[in-house]
Amino acid sequence: MRKSLHEIREIDQYIQKKMLGADRLVFQAKVLLSPSLAEDVRNQSRVYQCIKWFARERKSEQLQSIYNNLTEDKNFKNEIERIFA
């Protein structure tokens, strides 16, 4: 495996806490000794955070769409109003 792909895999395992024990300690030491590796870890962490935010936003849009569809359905709306009347 190319060095860059291996490094990306290591960073991924570290960020997702799949790297344990001595391997994690060795990787943390590498990060402390290598400013470029530390920057790569920060950047990859930011990418994961953006993906999470995008997924949340998408889920929120889907839920809002479901809510809109349900509240526009007259039968559903009447049934809900009857239940809570």
Image: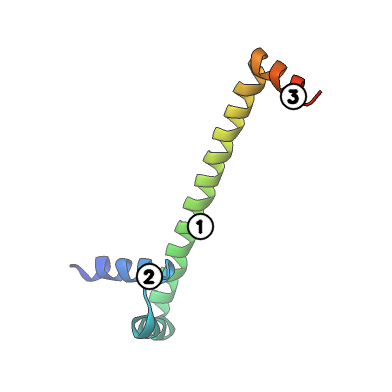
Circle number at residue 49: 1
Instruction: Name the amino acid, label 2.
Output: Lys
Query: How many residues crowd around disc 3 within 10 Å: few (fewer than 14), some, or many (20 or more)?
Result: few
The picture places residue 47, in percent across and down from the top left corner, at 45, 57
Q: Quadrant of residue 62?
A: top right
User: Which residue appears farthest toward the right when viewing the image?
Assistant: 85
> In this rendering, which labeled residue sits more in front, label 2 or label 1?
2
The amino acid type found where label 3 is placed reads: Ile
Q: Between 1 and 35, which is closer to the camera in this rendering?
A: 1
What is the CA distance from the residue labelled 3 to the residue labelled 1? Answer: 41 Å
Circle 2 residue: 18
Please name the amino acid that badge 1 sits on: Gln
Would residue 13 appear left or right of 84 to someone viewing this image? Answer: left
Identify which residue is drawn at 50% across, 52% down. Answer: 52
Residue bearing the label numbered 3: 83
Q: Report the Cα–Cα distance between label 3 and label 2.
A: 48 Å
| Quadrant occupied by the C terminus | top right
